[in-house]
Amino acid sequence: MTQFLFRDDSYLRSTAATVTAITPEGGIVLDRTVFYATSGGQPGDSGTLQRAEGSAISIATAVHPDGDKTQIVHVPEAGAALPEVGEEVVLELDWERRYRLMRMHSALHLLSVALPFPVTGGSIGADKGRLDFQMPEVPGDMAAVEAALNAMVEAAHPISQEWISDAEMEANPELIKTMNVKPPTGQGRVRLIRIGSIDLQPCGGTHVANTSEIGKLAIGKIENKGKQNRRVNLLFAD
Ligand SMILES: [Zn+2]
């Protein structure tokens, strides 16, 4: 089983690791990783895997094989030479991209506070993100929503994680804002992300430690996605 180092420290950019398996598709499995794997709307990390003999393998993304959330496969760029099982390697994140994904992921949690409607979907990118809301009427004053969002950023709320049992999760369904994404129960415990006193929701993603790190935000296009659903795009203003 792979140790998910990003879960307790999302700021870890690099780690030494040992290759434990190569998948039939040519993916690389390690005993530990700093690479987040695609899930919950957040894309997998990219970066490099440094081999002991000096060469480097570009890693295009990281995924959970067959949806198995206890495993992470590092997907190399096509045509890369693969390391041997047992080989010691050093993993290095494309930190610039990952840090923007962290800032945007935290920003979308704030958006779910600024727009308190059920969330039906979402996507996180390094340049923009979006949430789909069950929100038949778009609030008239979106400038006020944007101002509220930036006030939460500037208020410098701490962001932290905590864990509850599956049973506690089932007893508190109001914590779930995203209707069609089930919190990852079945492993005995569920991870929650707390933003100061303003938000608490189940989430497996990587976040910044303080809302002030997000920077100024701008609400982008609002698109109609059927009668009930509105897609709200969010951008970094810088
Ligand atoms: Zn999240």
Image (tube, helix red, strand yellow):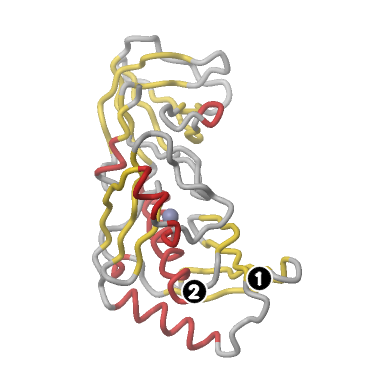
Q: Position of residue 218 (x, y in %)?
A: 49, 76
In the displayed structure image, the side of residue 225 where residue 155 appears, left or right = left
Identify the residue shown where x is 45% and y is 57%.
173
Local secondary structure at mark 1: strand
Give 109 or 104, whichever is nearer the viewer.
Answer: 109
N-terminal of the pair, mark 2 or mark 1, is: 2
In the displayed structure image, the side of residue 189 where residue 131 appears, left or right = right
Q: Position of residue 182 (x, y in %)?
A: 51, 47
**Location of mark 1 (residue):** 230
Spatial CA span between label 2 and label 1: 13 Å
Q: Where is residue 50 in the image (x, y as percent from the top left)?
A: 34, 25
Give 189 or 67, whichever is nearer the viewer.
Answer: 189
Q: Quadrant of residue 166?
A: top left
Give 74 or 134, whichever is nearer the viewer.
Answer: 134
Mark 2 beta carbon near ligand 1 (under 8 Å)? no
**Location of mark 2 (residue):** 116
Of circles 2 and 1, the one toward us is: 2
Instruction: Specify the quarter for ligand 1.
Output: bottom left
Please, what is the three-letter code of the amino acid marked with disc 1? Arg
Identify the residue shown where x is 43% and y is 85%.
147
